[in-house]
Amino acid sequence: MDALASKGNPVIICVCGLAGSGKSTLGTRIARKYGLKFFSGGNALKALAVDEGYGDVERGWWESSDGMRFLRERLKDSKFDKAIDRKLLEFARKENAVLDSWTMPWLLDVGFKVWLDASFEKRAHRVAGRDRISVQEASEALKRKEAETREIYRELYGFSLGEDFEPFHLILDTDLLEADEVFSILCAVIDNHVLHK
């Protein structure tokens, strides 16, 4: 990594995918393996929500009633999303990093961009297990959240999240893969096509 950085070639890896695709877990593991900084757009938005007076923003918060309320607030005012995207862009200019973000694949003209694909059913089961809720509750929450999130980014940047794959270098279907298999595949791609080992 240091050799690449010293040649003026920053290493930026964007990991993207809808809720339950495994992007945050994978992004963290990739950052650790390659000694990269990790920045999560979702976590940064949660920090802004805390500043706005929202309470507990732990795991599963986005699918909760408070998370949905903050999503509606973001629909009315794009200041939250714009602030996070400015931070992410600034971060990407300075650091070798893994970015867990829904917007950076479209806003950055550099970096290796990965989309983790998974069926709605698989993602709903994963979210239900993660958040200790029923699959039906997870499905309903995901439908609402994804429809409103798509609207935010369509209005703000003109792309359709989960439907527009133009900026991605790799689309990986995770339905039939375990987390370790997804990690191994992505490491092999990074070694061969990003770092040219």
Image (cartoon, grey):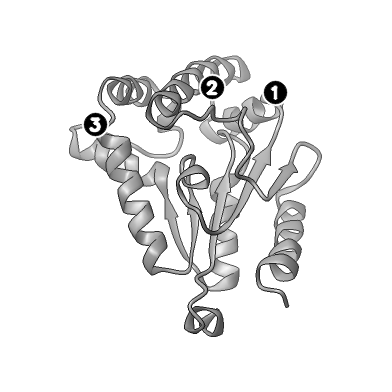
Indicate which disc residue 53 carries: none
**As displayed, is residue 19 above or below residue 194?**
above
**As displayed, is residue 125 above or below residue 196?**
above
Q: In the rendered view of the protein, which quadrant contains the C terminus?
A: bottom right
Q: Decide: marks 3, 1 in contact (CB < 8 A)?
A: no
Residue at left offset 41%, top offset 45%: 41
Count up the numbered dots: 3
**As displayed, is residue 100 above or below residue 140?**
below
Q: CA distance from mark 3 to mark 1?
A: 30 Å
Disc 1: which residue: 121
Q: Nearer the viewer, residue 34 or 78?
A: 78
Residue at left offset 41%, top offset 42%: 42
Indicate the position of residue 190 as horizontal and vertical percent values. Answer: 68, 65
* Among numbered discs 3 and 2, the one appearing first in the sequence: 3
Indicate which disc residue 54 carries: 3
For residue 152, what is the image quadrant?
top left
The amino acid pointed to by label 1 is Glu
Residue at left offset 36%, top offset 19%: 65
Q: Is residue 47 left or right of residue 95?
A: left
The amino acid pointed to by label 2 is Leu
Disc 2: which residue: 142
Which of labels 3 and 2 is toward the front?
2
Residue at left offset 39%, top offset 24%: 155
Indicate the position of residue 192 as horizontal and vertical percent values. Answer: 75, 69
